[in-house]
Image: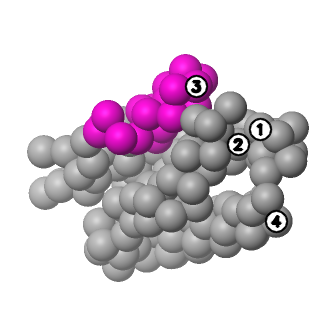
Amino acid sequence: MSLLQWKPEYSVGIESMDDEHREMIELINLVYQELGDSPDNDQIDSFLGDIFSSISMHFALEERIMRNTNYYEYPAHKADHEKLLDEIRDLMDSFADDPETGARVLQENLSDWFSEHFSSFDARLHRKIGQH
């Protein structure tokens, strides 16, 4: 069972960004599936590292696009990126310290990483990019 599904409204019309969003959804779904009945903690840890790396690279791409287009909400958007990266690091640390509790926290928060930021900051950015 998947936690997140790609939706047409996630598309921003920039192939590299859309590909990265799809990759993030896939990685989040892999972690979610691995958290099932008999989780492999090493595999989950590896997936979390992949998610962190993928999201970091994606945020760098978004930030470059925002700087290049003089996007008005760049400072707040970048600050939210930093907050999300801190939250992901905290979740990774929580899982490493106590896999059972960390797994529960991950299950409760995985979809939030993508959906909350995407539905707010990214949605506004994508509407602005679509105007160019």
For residue 124: magenta?
Answer: no
User: What is the C-alpha distance between the residues marked 2 and 4?
Assistant: 12 Å
Whole-percent x, y for residue 100 in the image: 32, 73
Region rendered in magenta: 6-24
**Closer to the camera, 1 or 64?**
64
Q: Earlier in the sequence, mark 4 or mark 3?
A: 3
The residue positioned 58% from the left and 25% from the top of the image is 14
User: What is the C-alpha distance between the residues marked 4 and 3?
Assistant: 22 Å
Type of amino acid under label 3: Ile
Say which element carries label 1.
helix
Q: Residue 75, labelled with which disc?
A: 4
Say which element carries label 2.
helix
Type of amino acid under label 2: Glu
Q: Which residue is mark 2?
A: 62
Residue contact between numbered discs 1 and 2, judged by CB atoms under 8 Å: yes
Residue contact between numbered discs 3 and 1, judged by CB atoms under 8 Å: yes
Question: Looking at the picture, does residue 73 appear above or below residue 23?
Answer: below
